Image (cartoon, rainbow, N blue to C red):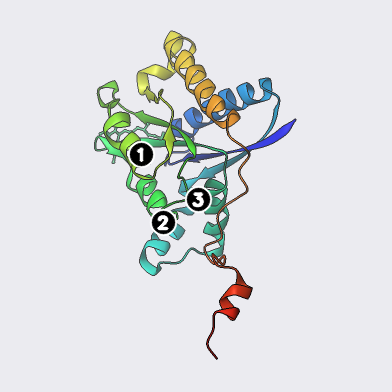
């Protein structure tokens, strides 16, 4: 049995939050499929509402607070990421975008990512394709084909058990497949790590 880590980023602001509910369902579907494939799974949930002030301070100062370091490292070091935003003004929320703005630019390169969103209207479901997917493509993540959008109407009655559930399971299976086929992450890259052998650095000196 090998260990895999999932980072789940939820940018919902309400309490309780439909964005968090969708994020939890996607995490459960992914975890179940990874367990079925023989992995032990660690899930780290990043509730962005709790880090909103620290994210803005990072934007203003250029440095993360100690409290923000843990969620940033969890995302940068994860084997797979689930990223879910509420739709605000037909796009991802500002808090969601700001968190990924303060993440090291190469942190998600090659990392499988599942995108999800919640909204008041189903008419804005394509925000997944014109906003979230391009953001993660730019960050050189591997975005799985199925993104999951849940409008208010999707949470009631048959829809929640039928169409939405089906999409959640399909997306979770796609993310698990991508995580399964890669070696486990060695953790977040150290930005201060020496890229040249130290002995060679000294040997090359003239004095
Ligand atoms: C400022 C603001 C703008 C919003 N804009 C949209 C929108 O353009 N399209 C949409 O479908 N829903 C919109 N909504 C509704 C939210 O996306 C929806 O209520 C979301 O599911 C809330 O997530 P939460 O329960 O996790 O906080 C907006 C809500 C707010 C507060």
The disc placed on residue 109 is none
Return the disc, 1 or 2, that comes first in the chain's sequence: 2
Q: Which residue is mark 3?
A: 50
Q: Residue at x 44, y 8 (%)?
A: 158
Q: CA distance from mark 1 to mark 2?
A: 16 Å
Return the disc, 3 or 2, that comes first in the chain's sequence: 3
Quadrant for ligand 1? top left
Q: Secondary structure at mark 1?
A: helix
State yes or no: discs 3 and 1 in contact (Cβ < 8 Å).
Answer: no
> Percent position (x, y) of residue 19?
44, 33
> Percent position (x, y) of residue 141?
43, 40
Q: Secondary structure at mark 3?
A: helix
State yes or no: discs 3 and 2 in contact (Cβ < 8 Å).
Answer: no
Q: CA distance from mark 3 to mark 1?
A: 26 Å
Q: Secondary structure at mark 2?
A: helix
Return the disc, 3 or 1, that comes first in the chain's sequence: 3
Depth check, mark 3 against mark 2: the one in front is 2
Q: Is mark 2 within 8 Å of ligand 1?
A: no
Q: Which residue is mark 1?
A: 137
- How crowded is the residue under tag 2: few (<14 C-alpha within 10 Å), some, or many (20+)? some
> Percent position (x, y) of residue 7?
55, 40
Depth check, mark 3 against mark 1: the one in front is 1
Query: Which residue is more in the foreground, 161 or 207?
Result: 207
């Amino acid at each position: 049995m090998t260990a895999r880590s999932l980072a789940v980023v939820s940018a919902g602001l309400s309490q309780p939050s439909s964005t968090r509910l969708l994020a939890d369902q996607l995490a459960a579907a992914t975890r179940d499929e990874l367990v079925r494939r023989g992995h032990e799974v660690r899930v780290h949930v990043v509730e962005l509402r709790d880090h909103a002030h620290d994210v803005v301070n990072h934007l203003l100062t250029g440095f993360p607070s100690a409290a923000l370091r843990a969620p940033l490292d969890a995302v940068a070091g994860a084997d797979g990421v689930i990223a879910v935003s509420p739709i605000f003004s037909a796009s991802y929320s500002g808090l969601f975008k700001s968190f990924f703005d303060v993440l090291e630019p190469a942190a998600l390169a090659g990392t499988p990512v599942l995108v999800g969103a919640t909204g008041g209207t189903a008419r804005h479901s394509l925000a997944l394709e014109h906003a979230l997917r391009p953001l993660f493509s730019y960050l050189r993540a591997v975005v799985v084909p199925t993104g999951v959008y849940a409008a208010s109407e999707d949470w009631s009655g048959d829809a929640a058990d039928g169409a939405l559930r089906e999409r959640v399971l399909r997306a979770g299976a796609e993310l698990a497949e991508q995580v399964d086929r890669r070696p486990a992450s060695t953790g977040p890259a150290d930005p201060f790590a020496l890229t040249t052998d130290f002995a060679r650095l000294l040997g090359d000196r003239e004095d």
